């Protein structure tokens, strides 16, 4: 299975250190397990910046990268080996594993964080730490910094604090060949899950049965699981953008919208397909689906280097708006309908977002001086236009009420155009009906 290689994490750390000014350090916590209820925890998932930098998968850890004249460059603080505890919760890497397997120059127990981190920060002038993102960990750091400032070596330690977001976000925004390979693996697993759902769904099944098939496939194929809570919405439920109840019966004559993607080695796949529960699109469904597919196809083709996400959204909006006018959902003329955002009654979200270690990944959508950011090779975005006509939309023609449609693919910008990473998953009317036939 494609995974990020250990040497890739080492290369990332070198790039980070090369980008830091002399005398600076980057401090990254990953957080701990969260209580779900009573003594039951949610499954742990490492902080994305921490995992991007270290590849270390365990909770409660801290990573320190230092660009100083002497001493270790990469230090990990990790939960120590504890045979009794490991009997219950699994084997830990421990301090030895942190250096031997994960490449730390030095490693210490998290119990020694305050005692060991203070001296390591004494030669540091500028500390990069994402305040406001690590509520549980910040008190420990604040106490340590206060102790440095008040101690006998008060002249030592960080004199300025910086947010590491810009540095790490820029790195994460441009995907390496290894990261792209992991994205392709996630796309292949997600394709299998969507195909299984579309072939197995029948009237009378419940949304949660389809959700179970999708997420079963993710785990069966070796993914961490889902990259975000899976959406399976039949009929009018597809008009709820982040519908996650997934509890209603799937009815004959309705469409089924599935927005679900696998997470592989921390990287998200994000795919939406809309298909008929009974295997055949009705006339009204075909009409609106054709509009969304036209907009989505054009937007995918426009995802090239130099274009902006705003450009792609504007193109999708223009096609969707004309389709809404043609089918009596809104009034024209086209330019007036766009300027007055009449389309937003039935298309209320943006067309694209960054994709990577987070499903809505990091990265500026605008350059520092204001204009929208041009796309570059190595960037991955989603393209996901839709039309949502809720059942209670009294101004809409009756035949379209209760229809929600979204089509979403993951598009990699390349030197000579783009690669649709999720193109294998059927999305034309002919291909979807043939899959069921």
Image (cartoon, rainbow, N blue to C red):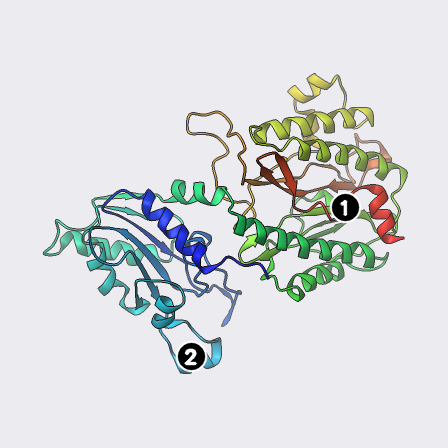
In the rendered image, residue 206, in percent from the top left (x then y), is placed at: 78, 59
In the rendered image, residue 278, in percent from the top left (x then y), is placed at: 88, 52
- The secondary structure type at the circle numbered 1 is strand
Image point 68% across, 54% down: which residue? 188
Query: Mark 1 vs mark 2: which is more N-terminal?
Result: 2
The residue indicated by pointer 1 is 274
Q: Quadrant of the N terminus?
A: bottom right
- The secondary structure type at the circle numbered 2 is helix
Task: In the displayed orientation, state which residue is furthest to the front.
Answer: 416
Residue 131 visible somewhere in the drawing: no
Q: Is residue 4 left or right of residue 139?
A: right
Image point 77% across, 58% down: which residue? 196
Q: Is residue 212 above or below residue 324?
A: below
In the rendered image, residue 151, in percent from the top left (x then y), is placed at: 13, 56
The residue indicated by pointer 2 is 85
Bin the neighbour count of mark 2 within 10 Å (Cα to Cα): few under 14, some 14-19, many 20 and up.
few
């Amino acid at each position: 299975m494609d995974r990020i290689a250990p040497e890739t994490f080492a290369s990332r750390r070198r790039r980070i250190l090369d980008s830091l000014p002399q005398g600076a350090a980057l401090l990254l916590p990953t957080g701990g397990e969260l209580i779900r209820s009573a003594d039951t925890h949610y499954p742990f998932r490492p902080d994305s910046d921490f995992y991007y930098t270290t590849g270390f998968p365990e909770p409660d850890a801290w990573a320190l990268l230092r660009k100083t004249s002497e001493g270790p460059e990469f230090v990990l603080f990790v939960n120590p080996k504890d045979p009794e505890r490991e009997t219950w919760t699994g084997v830990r890497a421990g301090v030895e594993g942190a250096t031997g397997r994960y490449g730390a120059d030095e490693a210490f127990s998290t119990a020694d964080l305050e005692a060991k981190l203070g001296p390591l920060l004494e030669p540091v002038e500028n500390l990069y730490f994402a305040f406001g993102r690590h509520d549980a960990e910040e008190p420990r750091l604040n106490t340590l910094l206060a102790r440095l400032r008040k101690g006998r070596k008060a002249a030592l330690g960080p004199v300025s604090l910086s947010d590491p977001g810009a540095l790490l976000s820029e790195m994460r925004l441009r995907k390496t060949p290894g990261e792209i390979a992991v994205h392709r693996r996630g796309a292949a697993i997600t394709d299998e899950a969507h195909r299984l759902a579309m072939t197995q769904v029948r009237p009378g099944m419940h949304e949660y049965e389809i959700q179970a098939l999708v997420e079963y496939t993710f785990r069966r194929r070796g993914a961490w699981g889902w990259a975000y809570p899976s959406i399976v919405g039949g009929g009018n439920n597809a008009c709820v953008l982040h519908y996650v109840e997934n509890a209603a019966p799937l009815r004959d004559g309705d469409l089924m919208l599935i927005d679900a993607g696998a997470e592989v080695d921390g990287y998200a796949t994000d795919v939406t397909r809309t298909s008929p529960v009974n295997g055949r699109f009705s006339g009204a469904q075909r009409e609106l689906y054709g509009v969304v597919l036209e907009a989505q196809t054009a937007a995918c083709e426009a995802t090239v280097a130099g274009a902006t996400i705003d450009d792609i959204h504007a193109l999708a909006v223009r096609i969707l708006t004309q389709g809404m006018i043609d089918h009596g959902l809104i009034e024209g003329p086209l330019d007036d309908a766009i300027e007055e955002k009449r389309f937003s009654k039935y298309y209320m979200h943006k067309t694209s977002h960054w994709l990577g270690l987070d499903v809505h990944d990091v990265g500026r959508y605008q350059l520092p001086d204001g204009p929208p950011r041009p796309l570059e090779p190595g960037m991955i975005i989603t393209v996901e236009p839709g039309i949502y006509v809720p059942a209670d939309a009294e101004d809409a023609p009756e035949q379209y009420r209760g229809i929600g449609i979204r089509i979403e693919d993951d598009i990699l910008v390349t030197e000579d155009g783009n690669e649709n990473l999720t193109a294998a998953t059927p999305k034309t009317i002919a291909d979807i009906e043939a899959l069921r036939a």
